[in-house]
Image: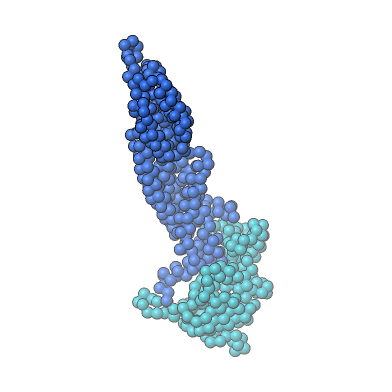
Amino acid sequence: MITFSHVYKTYRGANFRECHALRDVSLEVEKGEFIFLTGPSGAGKTTLFRLLSAFDRPSSGAASVLGYDIGKLTASELPAFRRRIGVVFQDFKLLRDRTIFENVALPLQVLGESSAGIERRVHECLDQVGLANRRDDLPELLSGGEQQRVAIARAIVHRPGLLIADEPTGNLDAAMAQEIMALFERANAQGTTLFIATHDHGLVQQSGKRVVNIRAGSITRGAKTESEDQWLRV
Amino acid sequence: MASRLTELIGRSWRHHPGTQLATLGVLTATFAIVVFMLTLSMNFRRVLTVWGEKIQVAVYLEEGLPSIATQELKSEIEKMPEVAEVELISKEKAADLFREQMASYAPDLMADPEFATPFPASFNIRLKSEGSADASLAQIERLAKQLQSRDGVEDVSYGQSWIRNYASFLNVIQAVGLAIGGILMLGALLIVGNSIRTLVAGRREEIEILELIGATRNFVRRPYIAEGAVLTAIATALAIAANGAVFSWQLGVMKKSLAFARIANEFRFFQIWEMAFLVLLSAGIGAAGAWLTIRSMNDGWAAARKLAAKGDLV
């Protein structure tokens, strides 16, 4: 499902010094897994997510997701790959001039679904994230937590094979965070592989799922038990 | 699909009314000049063609040419392949025609019993139509040269100088029109491109998000291309309407002030199918301008490029 082999992502800073956002990252994830990615701010979680979602390309190394080589994705392969994943961005990336319904409907429109199908599925997802009554509002009228739930609804609306979420519960209260996690659990039970970055240690410990820890651009063992760490190859 | 395009175009008008109006204004002005040049060129050519069809070659006969020789010459001319009709205008008939035409301008002179016609007998020759004005002119000149050498012919007249000058003038107008039209069309392409570039800059985030959720390049581009086509089509329709209004007004003025010349009857504006063709053509130019602009801005990595611009990606 996901194979990273000696992946580097390098930026050049203002003083022309090279900075490795990811350093020699090797990782394997099987289909249907539910993984938490943890690590301090600036550790490289977002960069790793950008590569997983083909938001960006690795500077070196091999990154394969859903059978696609991220470093070699052609312009015509790119949309096909992105349609198979769902991404909850840290900054939500909602279109400000579209209603909640229109934002969530976008992936289905891109897939060419019928209007009736879009209406039904979007309503279902908005209902799941508790925002069915806000469908005609613009994002700016919603709180940060509500916008995050819209982003989640948009990420799951087309039933992706891989769901990647960057701090999806960061702006939510404990009760809503539990609801969102339940939503993710449901998606995972239906066969979707989940890769979720979070700072919420309580949530991670409670879930008992596999944890990947990243620090200074490299994957480390983190808080996982030895037996669960069999998945992790550093 | 149509409703999505309508919705997106409507959205860009709601969110960028100033840009859209300014673009529409500039495009309308540009296409108004193009339509004006086309109208001018079409009507000059039309007048020349219509006048060319009406041009008659006048063959003035020598004073005192015997009647038999006149008839023989008439039969000879009638047999010429380019000749449609030959009419003999006797000296007396020429005088009558002159009186008839000039009666309102010089009534005293015409009423003078002493007035004698200065015109000799002549043949008025109407030619078979050759189609274009240039072909008609060549045909007339060929025939005139032939007739000039005949016995009994004093002179041949067909308005050589004005028709030649008019043809040259028409050629210049057409060349200038073509050059200006070409430059303006290129300008229109750039204007549409710039307008789309502004729209794209305003909706860069939307393009990034659409790309990130798997929209194909065509899915992202289509609304912009449609917008370019719609903008130029509307601009051309407005330009045609404005030119049509000015044309009607000028035609009215000409009909009053140049009534005697009856020139106004020869002018016409574009027919419906010609207008439709112009609108479609300009829509094509608009779509091309938009496509040229957007194709370099949406290759699937817009978000990554933005990131690279911020952080100098290695």
Residue at image coords 57%, 54%: B4
The answer to which quarter of the image holds residue B61 is top left
Q: Residue furthest top?
A: B113
Image position of B79 with respect to A220: above or below = above
* Residue B218 shows up from this direction: yes
Tally of marks: 0
Residue at image position (36%, 26%) is B152
Image x and y of residue A172, in percent:
56, 69
Residue at the image point whose x is 60% and y is 60% from the top: A109
Q: Nearer the viewer, residue A138 or B261?
A: B261
Position in image of residue B12 (x %, y %): 49, 53
Question: How is this picture coloured?
Answer: by chain
Quarter the N terminus of chain B occupies: bottom right
x then y, percent, for residue B108: 32, 13
Between B153 and A147, the one nearer to me in the picture: B153
Chain B colour is blue
Q: Is residue A33 above or below residue B14?
A: below
Q: Which quadrant of the rendered structure holds the C terminus of chain B?
A: bottom left
Q: Nearer the viewer, residue A92 or B95?
A: B95
Residue A141 located left or right of residue B248? right
Residue B296 versus residue B186 in the image, above or below: below
Q: Quadrant of residue B55?
A: top left
For chain A, the rendered hue is: cyan
Image point (53%, 73%), residue name: A73
Looking at the image, which is closer to me, A30 or A178?
Answer: A30
Q: Position of residue B133 (x, y in %)?
A: 42, 38
> Does residue A140 appear left or right of residue B93 in this picture?
right
- The outermost residue toward the bottom is A226
Q: Is residue A169 visible?
A: no
